[in-house]
Amino acid sequence: MLYSQTDAAAKRAAFRDRLATGELLQFPGAFNPLSARLIERKGFDGVYISGAVLSADLGLPDIGLTTLTEVAGRAAQIARTTDLPAIVDADTGFGEPMNVARTIQELENAGLAGTHIEDQVNPKRCGHLDGKQVVDDETALKRIRAAADARRDPNFLIMARTDIRAVDGLDAAKDRAKKLVDAGADAIFPEAMRSLDEFAAIRAAVDVPVLANMTEFGKSELFTTEQLASVGINIVIWPVSLLRMAMGAASRALDTLNEQGALTSQLDAMQHRSELYDLIDYESYNHFDATIFNFTVEK
Ligand SMILES: C[C@](O)(C(=O)O)[C@H](CC(=O)O)C(=O)O
Ligand SMILES: [Mg+2]
């Protein structure tokens, strides 16, 4: 009923405990609060909130056009929907180091369990595209130091993402990852790794959790959870997958409407009304007023 019964501090503490086990935690990307609830119902370990999804949701490209206000507001709506930890993509941190500091505090206030800050120049782009540029070490490290300085809850996870592998190679990625940890990063997100061996190399280079980004149509092979666990990865995300699946289904539905003038042939592909009502815990609102859920839904 309504929102999560677990406060943000408890979610963060539980998340840290899970990370400490060293097992692979699975964080599918939610594209709205309802899909976050579905991720929880399906038994996953956490919810990822993608910057690409938040920008696409607004009909914008993933080039840093979203504002901190928009990202923190939407992330709060998603984070409050489940008892799971939610981590959000904060792109380059929304400006200079002092802006990164504000970003951390706004995301803590929004109930997030953590965030990642990347070392791309602005305007950023999807990390799986060609033509990326990264800032120098000093700028990348200042962003992470500012984030670590600003955090109030020590369990709020500050993850440093580096896109440098695509620009200067794997050795540069290992070197920067080590420096980012020294600057205060609790975890490392090595973007657009090309092989399991590359993930293993980053895993060996740092002693903090490492995230693997299994986004489709990019530079990384889509490794299985078993493969990623075998090289010691700690968090895996599928950031845009549910949005891609949903938009693919919506496109096919509109084609069917154009062709058939009805969606009767697609009913089996739809989430049933009863499934939706179960997912939003509709019946629980009888707690306030017994006349709210006083009907039956034919399955
Ligand atoms: C993880 C990511 O930063 C995101 O915004 O979800 C993107 C995902 C994508 O565009 O496929 C990324 O830069 O990898
Ligand atoms: Mg992103």
Image (cartoon, rainbow, N blue to C red):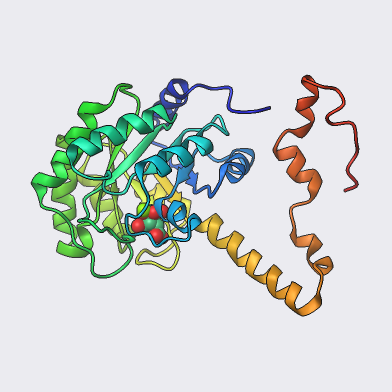
Relative to 48, say whether 227 is above or below: below
Residue 195 image offset from top left, x and y in percent: 32, 62
Residue 251 image offset from top left, x and y in percent: 63, 69
Relative to 46, say whether 18 is above or below: above
Relative to 158, say whether 213 is above or below: below
Q: Nearer the viewer, residue 237 or 262?
A: 262
Residue 21 image offset from top left, x and y in percent: 40, 31
Occupied quadrant, residue 179 = top left
Q: Residue at x 18, y 39 (%)?
A: 97
**Image quarter of the N terminus:** top right
Position of 282 with respect to 10 (left or right) is: right
Q: Residue at x 70, y 39 (%)?
A: 279
Question: Can the viewer see residue 102?
Answer: yes
Question: Can the viewer see residue 184?
Answer: no
* Ligand 1 visible in quadrant: bottom left
Q: Nearer the viewer, residue 179 or 64?
A: 64
Occupied quadrant, residue 285 = top right
Q: Residue at x 46, y 24 (%)?
A: 8
Occupied quadrant, residue 125 = bottom left
Position of 31 with respect to 199 (left or right) is: right
Q: Residue at x 39, y 40 (%)?
A: 69
Position of 112 with respect to 103 (left or right) is: right
